[in-house]
Image (cartoon, grey):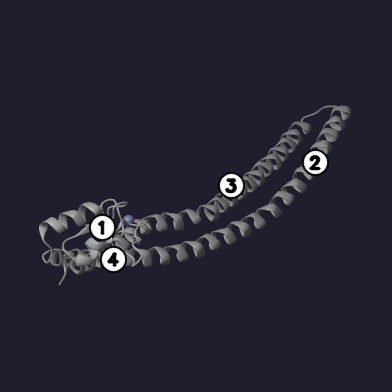
Amino acid sequence: MSVVQSLLDLQEIDGRIRALQQESKDIPQRKSQESARLQGARSLVEQAKNDLKSAQLTVSKLEGDVKALRDKILELKKHQAQLKTNKEFSAYNLEIAKIEKDIDVAEANLIGSMDHVTPCKTVLDEREAKLKEEQSVVDAYCAELDARLAEVQAELLSCQKTRDEATKLIQPRELFIYDRLLTKRWPVVVLLQEDGVCKGCNLQQPPSILQGVRRKQGLVACQMCGRIVYQ
Ligand SMILES: [Zn+2]
């Protein structure tokens, strides 16, 4: 087998390794993008929780108000029983009637605020259900990604072994040149077209390079990009 053919075989394995490395780098990023998608649904749930809490607080406050007014009336009635004059008695009646009106207003508000609680609960339930649904889609997708990552890592290990075997067929000097190029160029070994254009950088090579490649003696590098060229 020619040196170039051994390097092309190695390059094929390296192509697979590069693709797998890229994929294993992309997977965690895809997972975090997926989780970020839930952010919108999560903040809608938070908002609905706050709305419900505030509706419930309004109800409690109005219940407290009504109770305080009723207590006040009881207190007034207790006092009223000890009064001596009709004038004082009437004044208390007026005061009590005024508070009863206040109670009517507070109770109407209380009913209104109670009516507001149920829709808030419904919105929260709907949003929680939606979040749960989205979460399960994301969880399933992330589990697929995890499984894929495990496959990618296993394949990378096996590719690395195949690569080690493939490098045994290449002389250390050629392998050194190839590996050095691999750190800065991809692909490393490229076709030199019949018209003398390098397929790596698309630049025309001088005739000496074309001749060197055709002699098939050792490795020939593109004068512009340094890649190993072959025909
Ligand atoms: Zn080139």
Answer with left or right where residue 80 lies relative to residue 167.
right
Ranked by sequence position, the earlier of labels 4 and 3 is 4
Ranked by sequence position, the earlier of labels 2 and 1 is 2
Q: Nearer the viewer, residue 94 or 162?
A: 162
3D distance between C-alphas at marks 2 and 3: 33 Å
Q: In the image, what residue type sits under mark 2?
A: Glu
Mark 2 lies on residue:
100
Observer-side mark, 4 or 2, equals: 4
Find residue 186 and report its image quarter.
Answer: bottom left
Observer-side mark, 3 or 1, equals: 1
Ranked by sequence position, the earlier of labels 4 and 1 is 4
x then y, percent, for residue 86: 88, 30
3D distance between C-alphas at marks 2 and 1: 110 Å
Mark 3 lies on residue:
50
Q: Are marks 3 and 1 in contact (CB under 8 Å)?
A: no
Answer with left or right where residue 114 lies relative to residue 174.
right
Q: In the image, what residue type sits under mark 3?
A: Asn
Q: Quadrant of ligand 1?
A: bottom left
Mark 4 lies on residue:
16
Residue at 64 percent across and 54 percent down: it is 120
Q: Nearer the viewer, residue 14 or 88?
A: 14
Residue at 77 percent across and 48 percent down: it is 108
Observer-side mark, 2 or 1, equals: 1
Find residue 212 and report its image quarter.
Answer: bottom left
Q: Residues within 10 Å of mark 1 (few under 14, many from 20)?
A: few
3D distance between C-alphas at marks 3 and 1: 78 Å
Assign a secondary structure to mark 4: helix
Assign a secondary structure to mark 1: helix
Observer-side mark, 2 or 3, equals: 3
Q: In the image, what residue type sits under mark 1?
A: Ser
